[in-house]
Amino acid sequence: MSSFNKKTSLLIAVILSLCASWASAKTSGLYPVVKYREIPAPLQELFSKTEPDLGDVGSCATAFDSLSDDDKMVFTCSLYIKILAEGERRAIQRCEEMKKPKGIKAACHIISK
């Protein structure tokens, strides 16, 4: 195999690896992310119920100041969206709007499995 073919094969492997890791993360990288296992149990339950409706590019966002007080948690999702970044933007925007009346200080994050 020539040097050119080896370099081309390596480049293709790197690109495929990056694509696979991006696809498995299922986030655009534009907004902060919190892992599913790091959110409070009530929010995990909501996310698990909503996840089947997310499709390939739907997104959920959350913010919480307490791990047990439901009044200090917000959760929202964008379903049936065609562009991942748009779903995230809408979920974050709604999360920010929902947390203000509750006085939640924590930043909104996109939930990632």
Image: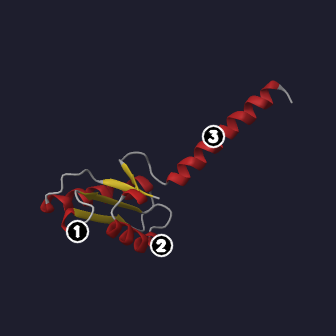
Where 70 sits versus 37, above or below? below
Looking at the image, is mark 2 or mark 1 earlier in the sequence?
A: 2
Q: CA distance from mark 2 to mark 1?
A: 23 Å
Could you tell me residue 106's position as x and y percent?
A: 23, 51
Q: Residue at x 37, y 55 (%)?
A: 110
Q: Which mark is residue 88?
A: none
Q: Which residue is mark 1?
A: 70
Q: Residue at x 78, y 30 (%)?
A: 6
Amino acid type indicated by mark 1:
Asp
Crowding around mark 1 (Cα neighbors within 10 Å: few <14, some 14 to 19, many 20+) is few
Rendering colour mode: secondary structure
Which numbered mark, 3 or 2, is in the foreground of this view?
A: 2
Q: Is mark 3 in CB contact (under 8 Å) with mark 2?
A: no
Q: How many marks?
A: 3
Where 110 sits versus 48, above or below? above
| Residue 103 as seen in the image, left or right of residue 61 | left
Q: Residue at x 69, y 39 (%)?
A: 12
Write down the quadrant of residue 74 in the picture.
bottom left
Looking at the image, is mark 3 or mark 2 earlier in the sequence?
A: 3
Amino acid type indicated by mark 3:
Ile
Crowding around mark 3 (Cα neighbors within 10 Å: few <14, some 14 to 19, many 20+) is few
Q: Which residue is mark 2?
A: 52
Write down the quadrant of residue 14 in the picture.
top right
Q: Which mark is residue 15?
A: 3
Looking at the image, is mark 1 or mark 3 earlier in the sequence?
A: 3
Amino acid type indicated by mark 2:
Pro
- Element marked by disc 3: helix
Relative to the observer, which residue lies in front, 72 or 27? 72
Write down the quadrant of residue 69 in the picture.
bottom left
| Residue 88 as seen in the image, left or right of residue 12 | left
